Image (tube, rainbow, N blue to C red):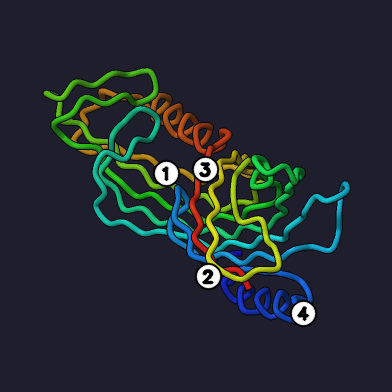
Amino acid sequence: MKLSHLTLLAPLACLFFNVNAQASDYSVGGTVGSQGVGVSLTKRSELNLMESDQLQWHLLLSGYSFDDADDVEVNQNDYKADMEAGSLQAGLNWYPSTNAYMKGLFLSAGTIYFDNKINGTTQGNKAINVGSVNLDSEQGVQLQTEIKHSSLAPYFGIGWGNRLNAESGFSFRAELGALVSLSKADVNVSLINHTNQVSDADLEKERNDIRDEQSRVKLFAQLDLGYQF
């Protein structure tokens, strides 16, 4: 399923939150971070894990697109690349403390669906590594790589801010988390200007190394400025 299809769920999600918001606080906001620019929607849950804590349902839709981005690093090689990314994040934020100094602290967990694409080529005047082969800049060999990675990914995070209360107004939230994809990326690699310096086995090793790199645990960070109703 592509992210463009998932964007159709956003209006339905907004309707769900608004219908159930009657006596509960909720907020909408704009977000910027490692997953791009987006919009977020948060609703206070009536559930509690302990006395005086707060649980929030959180939904975030974000993405970015860059053409001819320089110094995009993939498996220790620098590329000039076109990049696209989109994600839909749904989860829970838990504020365990009401202490004056700690009430803004929250723990988060949920699931992210992301759809990322990278299509790039290394510079001809730079040294590159392909599999176990090192090629210097004078050889002029370039590596062309295309990555398509769509997957569900559980995430966990910690953050500060946007604890909902009865008062309306602007709110701020910052979050740092980690996610791990549940499926591997589709990767295609090819060489430009080469004269048998790289074997098929090394080219396949490079492809597999890139797939493994894309599947590692990834960190994300985001800042959110919202308005609480």
Residue 4: image tag:
2
Spot occupied by residue 95 in the image (x, y as percentages of width and height) = 73, 48
Tell me which amino acid carries mark 4: Gln
Work out whether mark 2 precedes mark 1 in sequence or the reverse, and give the earlier one.
2
Q: CA distance from mark 1 to mark 4?
A: 51 Å
Q: Helix or strand or loop: what does disc 3 sit on?
A: strand
Circle 4 is placed at which residue position?
A: 22
Label 3 near label 1: C-beta < 8 Å?
no
Q: Is residue 92 above or below residue 218?
A: below
Work out whether mark 2 precedes mark 3 in sequence or the reverse, and give the earlier one.
2
Circle 1 is placed at which residue position?
A: 188
Q: Helix or strand or loop: what does disc 4 sit on?
A: loop
Image point 88% across, 48% down: which residue? 51
Q: Classify mark 3: residues with Cα within 10 Å, few (<14), some (14-19) or many (20+).
A: some
Tell me which amino acid carries mark 3: Phe
Q: Is residue 209 above or below residue 113?
A: above
Work out whether mark 4 precedes mark 3 in sequence or the reverse, and give the earlier one.
4
Residue 220: image tag:
3
Q: CA distance from mark 1 to mark 3?
A: 26 Å
Work out whether mark 4 precedes mark 2 in sequence or the reverse, and give the earlier one.
2
Q: Quadrant of the N terminus?
A: bottom right
